[in-house]
């Protein structure tokens, strides 16, 4: 039996890339949560909408509905839920295995960036396929949220939305990890007060028209690009909150 001594213990820290990949693998311990279930549910919603649109088309003797269906928005909301669940479930576990808070946040951020890119690429590709078959002849625009966008524009727009939802989810989960239910009450109450105050300020200064003009000028992709500000604030908030959080089971 070999006794461990101070001299025999490793003194060189593992490379940052390896530590980040370890966190990513920890998050993917149950791939069904992050990949399997969202894809299956999204597919179920799509098939259900396909059947409903088919019935409407049959009932109206071929007349097709017009406009974006909106069902693909499920994956946006689910991304927020995934971020909340991941931080709540894996943060205490990662720290228990000796990971630093910095490595955990970098690994989690890298994983959700890759997941968002993967989902965005899939949705953009399915949108092109949907467009190629003329929306099945029944006007079902489930994935194709803009018939004028190219594949890359659809990919970029979807990626920005998914990153926004992931960032909000991580920030929200961080508040819960550190301050539990009390933090959530204060967070949501503060958010409501902030939104009401912004609405009041815009109304009082008669600035709603200017806000509308700003978004109209920026366009869809330009507006989504501005969401990066909120995405960055959410990521910074998650980092600042989790760096001082102590995982507990209460």
Image (tube, grey):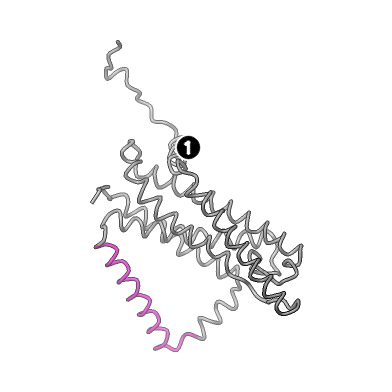
**Residue under the point 65% across and 62% down:** 153
Where is residue 178 shown, x and y percent of the image?
A: 27, 54
Label 1 crowding class (10 Å Cα cut-off): few <14, some 14-19, many 20+? few
Residue 63's image quarter? bottom right
- Is 250 one of the magenta-colored residues? no
Q: Which residue is mark 1?
A: 17
Question: From which residue to which does the magenta span run?
Answer: 182-208
Where is residue 111 shown, x and y percent of the image?
A: 49, 47
Q: Residue furthest top?
A: 1
Q: Is residue 227 left or right of residue 55?
A: left
**Residue under the point 28% across and 17% down:** 4
Q: Is residue 105 left or right of residue 241?
A: right
Where is residue 170 shown, x and y percent of the image?
A: 40, 56
Q: Nearer the viewer, residue 26 or 227?
A: 26
Q: Identify the main secondary structure in magenta.
A: helix
| Mark 1 secondary-structure assignment | helix
Q: Is residue 88 left or right of residue 182?
A: right
**Residue under the point 30% across and 12% down:** 2
Placement of 2 over or under 29, stated as above or below: above
């Amino acid at each position: 039996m070999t006794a461990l001594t101070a001299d025999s213990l490793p003194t060189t820290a593992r490379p940052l890339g390896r530590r980040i990949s370890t966190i990513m693998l920890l998050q993917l311990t149950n791939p069904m949560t992050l990949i399997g279930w969202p894809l299956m549910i999204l597919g179920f919603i799509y098939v259900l909408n396909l059947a409903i649109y088919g019935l409407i088309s049959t009932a109206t003797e071929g007349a097709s509905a017009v406009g974006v269906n909106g069902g693909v928005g499920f994956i946006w909301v689910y991304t927020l839920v995934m971020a909340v669940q991941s931080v709540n479930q894996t943060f205490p576990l990662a720290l228990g295995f000796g990971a630093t808070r910095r490595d955990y946040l970098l690994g989690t951020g890298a994983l959700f960036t890759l997941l968002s890119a993967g989902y965005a690429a899939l949705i953009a590709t399915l949108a092109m396929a949907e467009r190629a078959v003329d929306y099945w002849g029944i006007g079902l625009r489930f994935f194709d949220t803009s018939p004028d966008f190219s594949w890359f524009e659809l990919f970029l727009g979807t990626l920005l939305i998914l990153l926004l939802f992931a960032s909000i989810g991580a920030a929200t989960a961080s508040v819960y990890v550190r301050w539990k239910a009390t933090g959530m009450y204060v967070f949501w109450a503060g958010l409501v007060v902030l939104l009401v105050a912004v609405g009041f300020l815009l109304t009082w200064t008669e600035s709603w028209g200017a806000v509308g003009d700003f978004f109209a000028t920026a366009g869809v992709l330009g507006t989504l690009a501005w969401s990066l500000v909120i995405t960055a604030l959410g990521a910074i908030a998650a980092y600042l909150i989790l760096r001082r959080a102590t995982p507990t089971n209460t």
